[in-house]
């Protein structure tokens, strides 16, 4: 390889890294939409030829279906937009490592590459528990890039769960106070009668 080729390929790698950050931030913006609905913030975008063709964020509780994961929504939208179930040539950017259902859908839809923010040791099937994206037995393997905006992806989840715990605690205390007040009122009325 000549020096010129070397620098050209290096630039391509740098460009790809920049692009990965740019689109992961779009996926993070999707995750923020989930917070507004009180949903666990996980966001996803699918990119084809430099254009976003599908977006999605977790709406599992709102839609009351396990199928409402960010990745499934984004795959559905991209397929509608491109008019094809095959998403060859597409890259998915997702803020949290996909579960077994979404990893299966990614392989089935023949997405070329998946870029992942944070890992999910308790449910991830793109390397944590198992890696469905790279099974040689399947007829399609997906290239994976890990650790893109991982800190931001973790942070948004941590903030959500810290806030949720605070709200749950406050609700529990309010309920306890209301129960105490009701018990005291009942006690007073017994004394009076
Ligand atoms: Zn999933």
Image: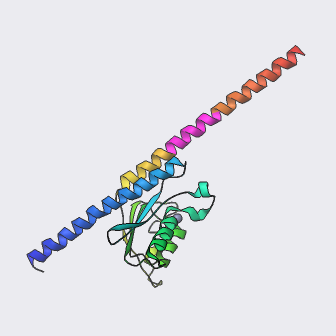
Number of numbered discs present?
A: 0
Measuring 40% from the left and 76% from the top, which residue is drawn there? Answer: 142
In this rendered view, identify the residue nearer to me: 75 or 164: 75
Q: Quadrant of the C terminus?
A: top right
Position above or below: 175 against 58 = above
Judge whether residue 170 can be spotted in this image: yes
Residue 131 horizontal/vertical position (percent) = 46, 72
- Residue placed most toward the observer, 136 or 71: 71
Q: Main secondary structure of the magenta part?
A: helix
Q: How is the image coloured?
A: rainbow
Comparing 60 with 164, the one in front is 60
Q: Which residues are magenta?
A: 161-172
Residue 15 at x, y percent in the picture: 23, 66
Q: In the visual, does 163 lie left or right of 173?
A: left
Identify whether 170 is placed above or below 76: above
* Quadrant placement of the N terminus: bottom left
């Amino acid at each position: 390889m000549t020096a010129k080729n070397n620098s050209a390929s290096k630039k391509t790698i740098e460009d790809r890294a920049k692009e990965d950050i740019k689109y992961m931030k779009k996926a993070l913006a999707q995750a923020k939409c989930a917070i507004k609905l009180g949903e666990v913030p996980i966001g996803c975008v699918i990119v084809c030829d430099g254009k976003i063709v599908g977006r999605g964020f977790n709406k599992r509780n709102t839609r009351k279906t396990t199928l409402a994961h960010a990745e499934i929504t984004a795959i559905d939208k991209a397929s509608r937009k491109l008019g094809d179930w095959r998403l060859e040539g597409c890259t998915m950017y997702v803020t949290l490592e996909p579960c077994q259902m979404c990893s299966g859908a990614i392989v089935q839809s023949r997405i070329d590459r998946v870029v992942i923010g944070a890992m999910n040791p308790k449910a991830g099937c793109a390397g944590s528990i198992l890696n469905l994206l790279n099974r040689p037995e399947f007829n399609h393997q997906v290239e994976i890039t890990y650790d893109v905006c991982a800190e931001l992806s973790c942070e948004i989840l941590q903030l959500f769960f810290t806030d949720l715990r605070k709200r749950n605690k406050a609700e529990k205390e309010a309920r306890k106070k209301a129960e105490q007040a009701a018990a005291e009122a009942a006690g007073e009325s017994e004394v009076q009668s």
